[in-house]
Image (tube, grey):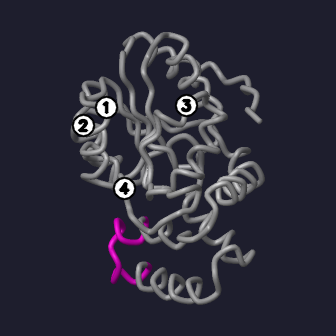
Amino acid sequence: MNSKETAISAPAAAFVDSVLRLQPKLAAFDCDGTLWTGDAGEGFFKWELARGLIAEDVARWVQGRYAAYREGKVSEDDMCGEMVTIHRGLREADVLLAAGEYFEANIAWQIFPEMQQLVRSLLDQGCEVWAVSSTNEWVIRAAMKHFGIAPEKILAAKVEVANGVVTDHLIRVPSGEGKPRAIREVVKRDPEAVFGNSRWDADMLKIARHAFAVNPNPDLEAVARGRGWTVYFPEGIQR
């Protein structure tokens, strides 16, 4: 179910209007931390492990991998990919259902109202809008129902699905340099406006005519201010 838009303040409306006045024809948005607070990919990973949705032996293995990731021994790309490939053998319909249940209960209420309004207004204005995320595609598909972005406009961590069953063959993990690479491979042109919040979005922001660091982590904020990118903190964010 799509969420209703919430009224936004004058400063938030001014930010939305400042973007709309640019009249971009193509825009790309990171998702976690940019369109809502929190990390939906990591959250879903922990949520489904806690509910036993992943086979016990796979769950034990991936928990060890996650601990190593937290210690810096497993790369961001590898961990994001493994959070998808652990679903091998499951029916995609079941994973989609679980992802939707998780997002509605845990993340939907954390959507930034002005970012939701911005995305919908850009679409109304005729802008082609893409969601680009290293979170698994199932969660992002559930999330984009709140923004009006169609499934075919999502570039997220993805594996091949054969006869409705998830495989462990990775198609893409858009993170860091992988984000602009995915855009150029699939969309075939650079976006005029890009929105991101972390250092993993910096490479994507660099290819845009108009770069927006939204709710940026300190490291990205420093880069953004140094490059003259727009820095915006959504309402309710405590710096």
| Local SS, label 1 | loop
Span shown in magenta? 70-80
Mark closest to the chain's N terminus, 4 or 3: 3
Marker disc for residue 184: 2
Q: Residue 77 at what x, y percent from top left?
A: 34, 65
Amino acid identity at mark 1: Val
Whether tag 2 and tag 1 are in contact, CB under 8 A, the answer is yes
Amino acid identity at mark 2: Arg
Q: Residue at x 56, y 69 (%)?
A: 87
Q: Residue at x 43, y 65 (%)?
A: 80
- Compute the Cα span from label 2 to label 1: 6 Å
Closer to the camera in the image, 220 or 190: 190
Amino acid identity at mark 4: Ile
Q: Residues within 10 Å of mark 3 (few under 14, many from 20)?
A: few
Q: Residues within 10 Å of mark 1 (few under 14, many from 20)?
A: some
- Compute the Cα span from label 4 to label 3: 19 Å
Quadrant assignment, res 200: bottom left
Q: Residues within 10 Å of mark 4 (few under 14, many from 20)?
A: few
- Compute the Cα span from label 1 to label 4: 15 Å
Mark closest to the chain's N terminus, 3 or 1: 3
Q: Residue 142 at what x, y percent from top left?
A: 64, 45
- Compute the Cα span from label 3 to label 1: 14 Å
| Residue corresponding to mark 3 | 150
| Local SS, label 2 | helix
Quadrant assignment, res 57: bottom right
Q: Residue 53 at what x, y percent from top left?
A: 69, 73
Q: Residues within 10 Å of mark 2 (few under 14, many from 20)?
A: few
- Compute the Cα span from label 2 to label 3: 19 Å
| Residue corresponding to mark 1 | 187
Q: Residue 105 at what x, y percent from top left?
A: 77, 53
